[in-house]
Amino acid sequence: MSGYQSREPDIEAEVRLLTKEEGGRHTPAKTGYRPAHLVIDDYLTTAAQHYLGQEWLHPGESCLAHLWFITPEVYPNSLWVGKEIQFQEGARVIGFAKVTKIFNNVLLKHS
């Protein structure tokens, strides 16, 4: 295992890349891609996206992915199943990740 995969992923999510017509990427993303994720309203963090069952995700496509955040301890209790997280390159939103499972209990929001 290398780098981010040396520990359990933080979450599983349905990841969708926006098309170029929607303002998204013009090219596909390869598994391991690390865009910025808006986990809470005022905090962007990087996460590695590992696409399950495929190496590439093309604009307009969706797939399940495991995500590894670089600083999950900074935003505890911030995620729940069904939450949608936008991800971006610079200021441009290029996709969304809808949380389907939470593996890292630090992130799990308790009711």
Image (cartoon, grey):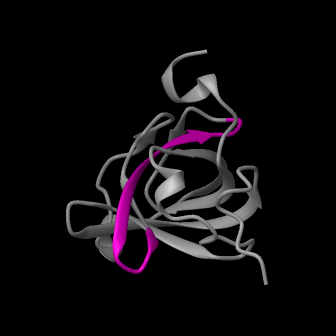
Is residue 34 rendered to the left or right of residue 13? left
Which quadrant of the figure contains the C terminus?
A: bottom right
- Residue in view at x 64 percent, y 70 percent: 77
Which quadrant of the figure contains the N terminus?
A: top right
- Residue in view at x 51 percent, y 35 percent: 31
Q: How many marks?
A: 0
Q: Position of residue 42 (x, y in %)?
A: 34, 77
- Residue in view at x 53 percent, y 53 percent: 72
Q: Position of residue 15 (x, y in %)?
A: 58, 59
Write down the quadrant of residue 22 in the picture.
bottom left
Magenta-highlighted stretch: main secondary structure? strand
| Vertical order, 37 against 67 (above or below) | below
Q: Nearer the viewer, residue 68 or 54?
A: 68
52 part of magenta stretch: yes
Q: Position of residue 103 (x, y in %)?
A: 75, 50
Write down the quadrant of residue 89 in the picture.
bottom left
Q: Nearer the viewer, residue 76 or 15?
A: 76
Q: Residue furthest bottom?
A: 111
Is residue 44 rendered to the left or right of residue 11? left
Which region shows up in magenta?
Answer: 39-53
Let me know if residue 18 appears in the view: no
